[in-house]
Image (cartoon, rainbow, N blue to C red):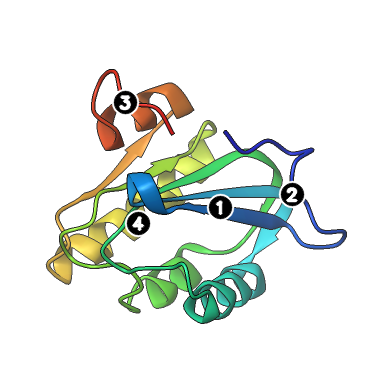
Amino acid sequence: MLSASDEVISGVPYVYKVYKERRLVLTTAFGVFCLADLLAYREQILKDPDFDPTYSQIADFTQVRQVGISGREVEQYAQFDLFSARSRRALVAPTDVEYGLCRVFETVREDRGEMGVRVFRTLDEALDWVIPKGATI
């Protein structure tokens, strides 16, 4: 499992790892997180040869200290189809602010036909939903 000490690049408020064998992208955000970070993430992952938009995703915001993005910016970002409409995407949002913003994202994605986005409070809940019981990554 990815941890803050594993692959953090200095100055980058997110890391991700593609688990090809599990068809999963695990994304972890750190520190202060804003729209520019989301846009940089999208640009970076689209260039990654291991990325496949049909994979599932867990986006973990438990390490975020400060949210620097508005609901309107989340709505705008959510208009872009990064993953397949059939992908399972779990967003882990432990605080009320993060949870609310992730729910905005979930709603916009549902409006665009993507029914596999869910918001959870813990990483364990997200893992249980994205990865079948007994499977490991």
In the image, 128 versus 31, the foreground residue is 128
Point 53% across, 74% down: residue: 48
Precedes in sequence: disc 2 or disc 1:
2
Q: CA distance from mark 2 to mark 1?
A: 9 Å
Residue that label 1 marks = 17
Q: Which mark is residue 135?
A: 3
Q: Would residue 36 be found to the left or right of residue 43 on screen?
A: right
Residue at far top of view: 134
| Quarter where residue 14 is shown | bottom right
Residue 104, x across and y down, in percent: 35, 56
Residue that label 4 marks = 104
What type is the residue that disc 4 sits on?
Val
Q: CA distance from mark 3 to mark 1?
A: 17 Å
What type is the residue that disc 1 sits on?
Lys
Residue 44, x across and y down, in percent: 59, 76
Residue that label 2 marks = 7
Name the front one of labels 4 and 2. Answer: 2
Name the front one of labels 3 and 2. Answer: 3
Whether residue 122 is visible, yes or no, is no
Point 37% across, 30% down: residue: 127
Q: Pointer 2 and pointer 1: residues touching (CB < 8 Å)?
A: yes
Q: Would residue 70 be found to the left or right of residue 91 on screen?
A: right
| Quarter where residue 132 is shown | top left
At mark 4, the secondary structure is: helix
- In this rendering, the answer to whether 35 lies above or below 99 is below
Quadrant, the N terminus: top right
Precedes in sequence: disc 3 or disc 4:
4
What type is the residue that disc 3 sits on?
Ala
Precedes in sequence: disc 3 or disc 1:
1
In the image, 22 versus 34, the foreground residue is 22
Q: CA distance from mark 3 to mark 4?
A: 30 Å
What type is the residue that disc 2 sits on?
Glu
